[in-house]
Image (spheres, rainbow, N blue to C red):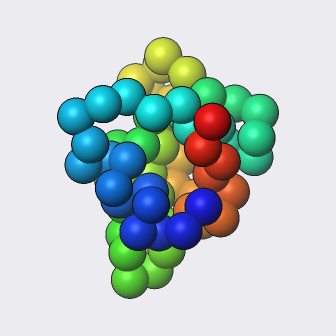
């Protein structure tokens, strides 16, 4: 995923399905456009967060 798309999903009022590496559902919590990184919550566990390259995120 492009960093700008990750930011658009984060800013949107609608919910979009996003997966990490095409497998694990995630919620985007922050996007760093300059470094193309995103902080995501894995599944429904608010304590399970990771900072990953946005290229690892897949929409849909």
Give whichever of 31, 48 is nearer the camera: 31
Spot occupied by residue 26 in the image (x, y as percentages of width and height): 54, 33
Spot occupied by residue 42 in the image (x, y as percentages of width and height): 56, 30
Give whichever of 41, 15 is nearer the camera: 15
Spot occupied by residue 43 in the image (x, y as percentages of width and height): 55, 22
- Residue at the image position 38 percent from the left and 83 percent from the top: 34
Q: Quadrant of the N terminus?
A: bottom right
Q: Quadrant of the C terminus?
A: top right
Position of 20 with respect to 40 (left or right) is right
- Residue at the image position 53 percent from the left and 47 percent from the top: 50
- Residue at the image position 61 percent from the left and 28 percent from the top: 25
Q: Which residue extends farthest bottom?
A: 34
- Residue at the image position 26 percent from the left and 43 percent from the top: 12
Whether residue 42 is visible to the viewer of this picture, yes or no, is no
Position of 34 with respect to 43 (left or right) is left
Say if 10 sits above or below 25 in the image. Answer: below
Q: Quadrant of residue 35?
A: bottom left
């Amino acid at each position: 995923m492009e960093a700008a798309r990750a930011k658009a999903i984060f800013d949107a009022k609608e919910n979009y399905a996003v997966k990490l590496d095409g497998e694990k559902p995630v919620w985007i919590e922050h996007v760093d456009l300059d470094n193309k990184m995103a902080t995501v919550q894995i599944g429904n566990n608010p304590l399970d967060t990771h900072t990953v390259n946005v290229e690892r995120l897949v929409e849909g």
